[in-house]
Image (cartoon, rainbow, N blue to C red):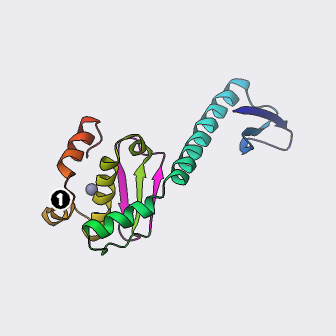
Amino acid sequence: MQVLIKRSKNRKKTISARVIQDVMHVSAPVSYPEKKLEETIEKFKARFEKQRQKKELNSKINLFEVAQRLNHKYFDGEIEVESIEYSANQNSIYGNCTHQKRTIRISHHLAKMPEWVRDYVIIHEMAHIIEPNHGASFWKLVSRYELTERARGYLMAKGMEL
Ligand SMILES: [Zn+2]
């Protein structure tokens, strides 16, 4: 990514950055140390890259449709999902579900794994909408998916099972 730095007299302490057509425009105080600025720009770059990744993933695949399909196949269409999307900042957790809001986020790492593993994670998080805890009734729901044990083993081997 190309970076354009503007030193601004109006800025006192903070740096701002935005990306316009793949060019990062950075505005920094005149007195801001060069080395610190470079470090900050690297952080901005990483953040923008994550945002870009997330956008790309979510535009490539409609997870909501996947969730609907799984919902009909395994839960008789009974689980209402409000939203589901990939997130790019979950490295050790493969997914999470805010069951009060019925929203699900799954790790971008799953996009690189087989579909049946991704489907397991979606099923797991969907089941949390009805059963927030990992109790017996939760696992009973999840085990409707026939590849549950295999998928858990796969994720465990990747260091991603909880
Ligand atoms: Zn869980």
Identify the residue at image location x=30%, y=75%.
78
Secondary-structure class at tag 1: loop
Where does residue 37 sit, x and y in percent of width and height? 70, 30
Where does residue 142 sit, x and y in percent of width and height? 21, 60
Q: Is residue 20 magenta?
A: no
Q: Residue furthest left?
A: 136
Identify the residue at image location x=32%, y=68%.
71
Quadrant (top left, top right, bottom left, bottom right) of the N terminus: top right
Circle 1 residues within 10 Å: few <14, some 14–19, many ≥20: some
The number of discs equals 1
Indicate whether 81 appears above or below 152. below
Q: Is residue 67 visible?
A: yes
Indicate whether 132 appears above or below 95. below
Where does residue 28 sit, x and y in percent of width and height? 77, 37
Identify the residue at image location x=16%, y=62%.
135
Identify the residue at image location x=34%, y=57%.
122
Q: Residue furthest right?
A: 9
Indicate whether 105 appears above or below 29. below
Residue toward you, 32 or 77: 77
Q: Quadrant of ligand 1?
A: bottom left
Q: Mark 1 belongs to which amino acid?
A: Ser
Looking at the image, residue 160 sits to the left or right of residue 23; the answer is: left
Q: Residue furthest top?
A: 35
Q: Is residue 93 magenta?
A: yes
Q: Is residue 14 visible?
A: no
Residue toward you, 82 or 18: 82
Where does residue 33 sit, x and y in percent of width and height? 73, 27
Residue toward you, 36 or 160: 160
Which segment is the magenta one? 83-101
Q: Which residue is mark 1?
A: 143
Looking at the image, residue 155 sits to the left or right of residue 44; the answer is: left
Looking at mark 1, is its residue's CB closer than 8 Å to ligand 1? no
